[in-house]
Amino acid sequence: MAIVEFRNVVKKFGGAPVLDGVDFSVEKGEILCIVGPSGTGKSVTLKHIVRLLTPTSGQVFVDGSDVAACDERTLVSIRRRVGYLFQSGALLAWMTVRDNVALPLRETTDIDEDEISKRVDAALESVDLLAAADKFPSEISGGMQKRAGLARAIVRESDIILYDEPTSGLDPVTSITIHRLIKKLNQTLGMTSIVVTHDLQGALQFAHRILLLRNGKVAECSTPAEFLNSQNRDVREFIAAMKGEM
């Protein structure tokens, strides 16, 4: 059974469809990368999974629950299962890395401070950032900020992680580090990962499947090898455009 499923999802803003009949599913433990031109609805797709947005029509399911139609209690339960790494990292500047990572546990659980400390240390260690725990965001690099954001996304022991452009603004070496972390978390913790990215070259290295969004529709959803060899015109044009940027 799919852990995340979109069924004929349409999302309109001002009457214009950004998503126009999107259908796909994600299996437990899978890494799905969503690629496509700017403005095609990649980040909008992610936001539907945790009901930051709701469909104009169609349905989004997380582990069998219709996200848009579920009650508040079920929604809270879903959101606790889903970690979200925002494009900016979204760290609070006045808090240390440790306190930023601890924030979801302090705000949404009644876990005592000793247990919070253990979970925060484990999350920071999993992204190789324990040594920077007591630094402030301004004192660490952009790549380290992304890793801190990732630690915060997993600290609640989420089993689904949503990544919105996790390597945006990072240099190639740091981008590879982030890609390896995504793969490591998938392999060691069995996390299901949905990654919105502009980095096709990176996605080809770690994704189980790649989904191409084009004009608000799913143009292709296939393994990296199938994606590279696809004769789909949208795929060929997208690959050609990406090669032009490399």
Image (cartoon, helix red, strand yellow):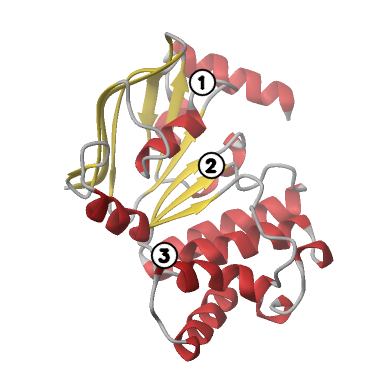
State the mark number for residue 123: none
Farthest residue in the top direction? 15
| Label whose residue precedes the other's in the sequence (3 or 2) | 3
Nearest to viewer (mark 1 / mark 2): 1
Residue 138, position as x, y percentages in the image: 82, 62
Disc 1 or 3, which lies upstream in sequence?
A: 1
| Disc 3: which residue | 187
Q: Earlier in the sequence, mark 1 or mark 2?
A: 1
Discs 1/3, front = 1
Contact (CB < 8 A) between labels 3 and 2?
no
Q: Nearer the viewer, residue 233 or 115?
A: 115
Q: Residue at 60% across / 38% down in the picture?
A: 201
191 vs 128: above or below: above
Does 151 appear above or below 237? below
Q: CA distance from mark 3 to mark 2?
A: 16 Å
Residue annotated with mark 2: 203
94 displayed left or right of 193: right
Q: Could you say whether the residue bearing mark 3 is in a helix, strand or loop?
A: helix
When asked about the image quadrant of residue 125, the answer is bottom right
| One can see residue 178 in this view | yes
Furthest residue in direction bottom, as rendered: 114
Q: Position of residue 20 (x, y in %)?
A: 36, 15
Counting every numbered tag in the picture gives: 3
Q: Hey, what amino acid is under mark 3?
A: Gln
Q: Quadrant of the C terminus?
A: top right
Which disc is residue 40 wearing? 1
User: For the point 38% across and 78% down, which residue is it?
Assistant: 110
